[in-house]
Amino acid sequence: MGSRFIECPICGQNVAMYLASVHTEGHFSTPDLPDVAPSGTREHAPSTGRGHESTIQIEESDDISVEHPGRVPSVEQPGQVPSDSQKCDSSYPGQCSQQETQKSAPGAAGDDRGDSSTTVIDDAAEESDHGTESFVPKKQKTGGGWSFLKNPTAKDVRGPRRTRKAFDLPPRPYDYLVVLDFEWTCDNRQRLEPLEIIEFPAVLVKTSFPPAIVSEFQVYCRPEKNPILTKFCKELTAITQEQVDAGVLLPKAIELHQQWLETNLPGGIGGGATFAMVTWSDADILGALHSELRRRGLQRPAHFDAWINLKALFKSHYKREPKGGLQRCVESCGLSFDGRAHSGLVDSINTAKICIQMISQGYSFSRTTRGFGPDGEAWGSAESRRQRAQREEEEKRGGRQDGAARGRHDSLVQPEPEQIRTGKG
């Protein structure tokens, strides 16, 4: 049939979709009940609007009557009163408990009547159209027409990976953003190894309305491997040799930065306020900070494990590529670039301006874009992919070795004497 018809799960007939509910309810309606005994009379009560329910009264010679709505009563022997165990307590019309269909054993304890106490079910009631079998639908294969009636699975509730259902709460935006832009040693003639941070700045932005910069932080760091700044580095960053000579080492700069966060964040680090690091690219944390901490053997603070690359979010929010560097991007948003470019604190303040404008336009900073995995490498980096492939290869090799070892062990196991005699094993 066409798509306008479905198969009834009870009788198997093809029924129009708009008549499916009426057709299905017809299988569960109670027809007129016939007389169950020659000497009985039947009385129908007025309809109560709850389906085909009727009150049936059986009059016997000993004036014993049993009333039950919507079911066929069993016919008792004259003079016998049905016991509590024989009364039907089923809430489904026509479906009685097994206690009513069982016969009481002759000569049971407390019964002086012997065989005369046997309960008899009228054959006419069992063979009638409204018997028990007509009210219990048989389990049949319904096919694909009624598949939408299945209960939802765990996957239906959870959904695919990285998706959110309509009844899930949206992710909570961060209360604060810590915008930073490191400056490190560089040269235009040769590559300096290793990279060393020489300026550690940061600004704290509150995301609640109205968003604004609430605090600033800046400290100069003294390089150890390349203590003398190149001419190109001093011209690019406007950092003098005297400033770095009077600066602190990187571990002390990280300690001062944490003290600044503890002072300016409500409740400090780990308190009630949530925050995330924000950079203009991944090079600040992934390149400069991560490489220097690993070279020094220092543990990375937990709040540097993940960060927001604002340059990656710029395209999705403004619908254009972030071309021309930070200053061009700030000016393309209609904002003024204050200060000298490539100064760490100046770049941090101007990056925060873009964050404030995005929040004012309705953007919610609720997720980080990059971070480090359990192996200590950044998500999706070449080193992380190499280590992951190496772990998978070791797991496969270990599985093959375990399987070969189990095969050798099974070949060396001798069967028990009982197994040899019976031919088992």
Image (spheres, grey):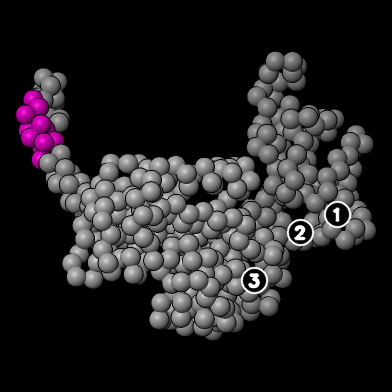
Q: CA distance from mark 1 to mark 2?
A: 9 Å
- Looking at the rendered structure, the kind of residue marked 3 is Ser
Q: Does the magenta-highlighted stretch encompass residue 147?
A: no
> Which of pointers 1 and 2 lies earlier in the amino acid sequence?
2
Give the crowd class for mark 1: few <14, some 14-19, many >=20 residues within 10 Å: many
Q: Is residue 397 left or right of residue 372?
A: left
The span shown in magenta is: 404-414
The answer to which quarter of the image holds residue 323 is bottom left
Q: Residue at x 17, y 47 (%)?
A: 394
Q: Which residue lies under the disc numbered 3?
A: 360
Outermost residue toward the front? 242
Q: Are marks 1 and 2 in contact (CB under 8 Å)?
A: yes
Q: Position of residue 421 (x, y in %)?
A: 10, 23
Q: Residue at x 78, y 44 (%)?
A: 73
Q: Which residue lies under the disc numbered 1?
A: 54
Q: Residue at x 72, y 49 (%)?
A: 92
- Looking at the rendered structure, the kind of residue marked 2 is Thr
- Looking at the rendered structure, the kind of residue marked 1 is Ser
Q: Which mark is drawn over residue 30? A: 2
Q: Position of residue 187 (x, y in %)?
A: 24, 66
Q: Position of residue 414 (x, y in %)?
A: 8, 25
The answer to which quarter of the image holds residue 63 is top right
Give the crowd class for mark 2: few <14, some 14-19, many >=20 residues within 10 Å: many
Specify whether residue 349 is in view.
yes
Q: Position of residue 147 (x, y in %)?
A: 53, 66
